Image (spheres, rainbow, N blue to C red):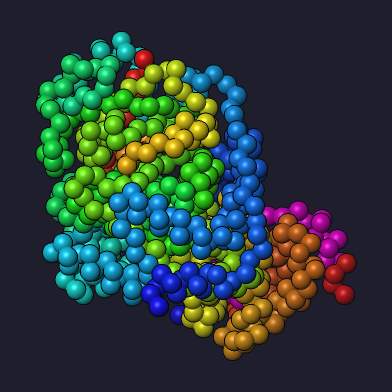
């Protein structure tokens, strides 16, 4: 299904859609407030962006440094060209351990590789241990947000689910009660697992260590109790120096949830005596994206989710409407690179208001890349594009100059698009959605000037 | 070719103009260190205690299993550190020394040498970290300066108790790890 069709589905439950919208806006607001307490915030974003530029320009040598240093510290390093190879590498390690039950902590990469169904097919029980991920796993759903996996669910739904799966009291919706039930249930899994899988937030070339950040402590509960730790890392997660973490840890949690830092930030350098540590470096389309001049910057993403929380389309259409592992604005520029036909509607799921680029801690030009993808898609896959709706929008979008004048101006432009365009039946994302409030005057001037 | 060679050669096939690595300024913080640190810990849902407050609290908390690896509280352990972390399943309290604390966010740095077992601060029901108030720094930049080239196999910043907001964004303390964090400033 296309994004507009999925979004229509999401909007059927209007009360829930409104809650979703407001809750994510609240998270966005928390991010704004905390970022304003750091005078050097904009400088930090700029430095983070420059560090990532340097990483993209030297990715090969940094990966080699990382590998060499990690091996020196006793970590086993594997390379996977794609999801299948990644999954097979994981399975090989599990089979060597005769392991049939594992715990896993938040890893978008393993979602991207579809690791769970693969392992289950081979008789391995996979338990996602992040509370939100466990909830969606019980429902056989993917996460709907990369930081808040169960944000599409209300506590009543989770209460019913836990009543069925964990035998909690029927109708008890108290989040503390439900969380405690999950704690007891997952503790048992942690204590039994011989192998634990985690994602990776940052890999450090100069030391060969990697860093995993959580608030729940689930990654650490898993790996420190297990005999074997498998860490799965996209090749773009490299940072050159340990001290770069100072910049990125200051930005990550503040951008993600508006908290000053995640409560647990673990730096893995070598395994405990007698234990094993593996890291799998995964490409899965990343080198192809690196080769796309216009889109390579999307690889700077640190998966904070800020662009989702701020996006008027994401907030009002839900993560599932994107039909891609990473939803929201960043997902809409990553996914077409993996499968342009399947994800052809995603770059259109945007008002191009530029709010995503404004909040991105590594300053990815997200809205500009969305615009570029629209060009690519209408050029090569016109028939999958938005057809008439797109043609209507062309009046505004076709001029790169007008577009580049500024994100703010575009915001105004969109706000003041004639209702007949925004709420045109073909422009499905316009349904039930109010565009952001904008200063009317500046638009009027702009519109007068550009209408001809 | 192996995937390793394929990936590396694909990367080499892309020419990207060289970009230099920026120097990171030594960003500082205004305000009083202990006060800022304390506010940060409170914000992360932890508590900050003086040694006297801690001494009053501990006997009343009535833990049956305590492990203290802190040089400041050498006589508090009721059990010794096992070899297998699974035996810590019903540990009530762990008392550990932190190396330094970061005022801007309350993050406290610990390494293998402070932890005994890496699972300890997670599996324990409650956690106390003892920190010398002289070892507070302003921001994460100074924190990483202190870590320098340390070669511990494992190190971590702990900034609060285990927490989650995955159910309707309601904050719940005590997801999987320690249900509370008390920082004793000495
Ligand atoms: S694109 Fe930027 S804002 Fe969006 S998730 Fe990635 S780092 Fe965060």
Question: Which residue does the image show at 49% across and 26% down from the upper left?
Answer: B137
Q: Give the quarter the ligand 1 occupies.
A: bottom right
A367 on left or right of A269: right
Instruction: Examine the structure image and report whether residue A355 is included in the region drawn in magenta.
Output: no
The answer to whether A106 is drawn above or below residue A3 in the figure is above
Instruction: Examine the structure image and report whether residue A428 is included in the region drawn in magenta.
Output: yes
The answer to whether B114 is drawn above or below residue A405 in the figure is above
**Quarter that holds the C terminus of chain B:** top left
Tell me where residue A405 sits by quadrant. Answer: bottom right
A114 on left or right of A53: left
Near-viewer residue (A195 or A41): A195
Near-viewer residue (A273 or B140): A273
- Residue span colored magenta: A427-448
**Quarter that holds the N terminus of chain B:** bottom left
Numbered-mark total: 0
Where's residue A188, x and y in %?
15, 49
Question: Which residue does the image show at 46% across and 23% down from the upper left?
Answer: B136
Where's residue A386, x and y in %?
61, 81
The answer to whether B120 is drawn above or below residue A287 in the figure is above
Does residue A389 show up? Answer: no
The answer to whether A132 is drawn above or below residue B45 in the figure is below
Question: Which residue does the image show at 44% across and 30% down from the upper left?
Answer: B106
A94 on left or right of A279: left
Question: Which residue does the image show at 27% across and 48% down from the upper left?
Answer: A271
Does residue B5 show up? Answer: yes
Where's residue A409, x and y in %?
76, 59
Q: Seen from this angle, which residue lies furthest bottom?
A: A383
Where's residue A436, x and y in %?
65, 57
């Amino acid at each position: 299904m296309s994004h507009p069709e999925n979004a229509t589905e999401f909007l059927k439950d209007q009360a829930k859609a409104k809650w979703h919208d407001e809750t994510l806006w609240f998270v966005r607001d928390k991010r704004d407030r905390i970022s304003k307490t750091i005078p050097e915030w904009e400088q930090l974003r700029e430095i983070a962006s420059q560090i990532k530029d340097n990483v993209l320009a030297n990715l090969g040598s940094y990966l080699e440094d990382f590998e060499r240093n990690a091996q020196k510290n006793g970590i086993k390093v594997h390379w996977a060209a794609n999801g299948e190879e990644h999954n097979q590498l994981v399975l090989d390690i599990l089979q060597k351990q005769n392991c049939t039950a594992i715990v896993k902590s938040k890893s978008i990469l393993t979602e991207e590789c579809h690791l769970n169904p693969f392992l289950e097919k081979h008789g391995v029980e996979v338990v996602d241990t992040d509370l939100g991920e466990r909830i969606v796993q019980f429902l056989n759903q993917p996460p709907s947000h990369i930081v808040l996996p169960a944000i599409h669910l209300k506590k009543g739904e989770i209460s019913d689910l836990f009543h069925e799966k964990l035998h909690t009291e029927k109708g008890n919706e108290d989040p503390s009660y439900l969380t405690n039930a999950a704690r007891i249930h997952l503790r048992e899994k942690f204590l039994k697992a011989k192998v634990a899988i985690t994602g990776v937030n940052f890999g450090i070339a100069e030391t060969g260590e990697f860093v995993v950040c959580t608030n729940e402590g689930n990654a650490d509960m898993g790996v420190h109790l297990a005999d074997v730790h498998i860490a799965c890392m996209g090749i773009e997660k490299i940072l050159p120096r340990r001290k770069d973490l100072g910049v990125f840890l200051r930005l990550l949690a503040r951008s993600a949830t508006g908290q000053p830092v995640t409560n647990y930030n673990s730096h893995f350098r070598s395994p405990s005596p007698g234990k094993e540590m593996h890291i799998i470096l995964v490409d899965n389309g990343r080198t192809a994206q690196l080769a796309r001049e216009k889109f390579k910057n999307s690889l700077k993403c640190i998966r904070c989710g800020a662009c989702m929380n701020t996006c008027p389309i994401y907030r009002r259409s839900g993560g599932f409407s994107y039909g891609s592992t990473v939803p929201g604005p960043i997902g809409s520029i990553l996914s077409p690179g993996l499968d342009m036909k399947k994800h052809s509607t995603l770059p259109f799921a945007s008002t191009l208001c530029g709010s995503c680029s404004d909040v991105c801690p590594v300053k990815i030009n997200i809205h500009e890349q969305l615009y570029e993808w629209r060009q690519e898609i209408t050029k090569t896959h016109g028939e999958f594009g938005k057809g008439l709706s797109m043609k209507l929008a062309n009046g505004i979008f076709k001029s790169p100059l007008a577009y580049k004048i500024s994100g703010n101006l575009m915001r105004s432009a969109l706000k003041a698009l004639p209702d007949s365009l925004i709420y045109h039946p073909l422009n499905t994302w316009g349904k039930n959605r109010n565009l952001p409030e904008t200063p009317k005057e500046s638009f009027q001037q702009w519109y007068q000037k550009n209408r001809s | 070719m192996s995937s390793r060679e394929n990936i590396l050669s694909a990367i080499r096939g892309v020419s990207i103009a060289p970009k230099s690595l920026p120097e990171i300024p030594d960003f500082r913080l205004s305000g009083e260190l202990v006060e800022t640190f304390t506010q940060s810990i409170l914000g992360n849902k932890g508590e900050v205690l003086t040694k006297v407050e801690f001494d009053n609290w501990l006997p009343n908390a009535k833990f049956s299993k305590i492990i203290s690896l802190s040089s400041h509280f050498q006589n508090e352990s009721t059990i010794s550190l096992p070899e297998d972390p699974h035996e810590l399943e019903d540990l009530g309290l762990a008392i550990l020394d932190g190396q330094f604390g970061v005022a801007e966010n309350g993050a406290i740095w610990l390494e293998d040498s402070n932890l005994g077992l890496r699972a300890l601060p997670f599996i324990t029901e409650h956690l106390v970290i003892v920190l010398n108030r002289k070892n507070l720094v302003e921001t994460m930049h100074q924190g990483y300066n202190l870590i320098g080239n340390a070669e511990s196999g494992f190190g971590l910043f702990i900034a609060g108790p285990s927490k989650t907001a995955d159910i309707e964004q309601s904050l719940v303390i005590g997801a999987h790890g320690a249900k509370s964090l008390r920082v004793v400033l000495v």
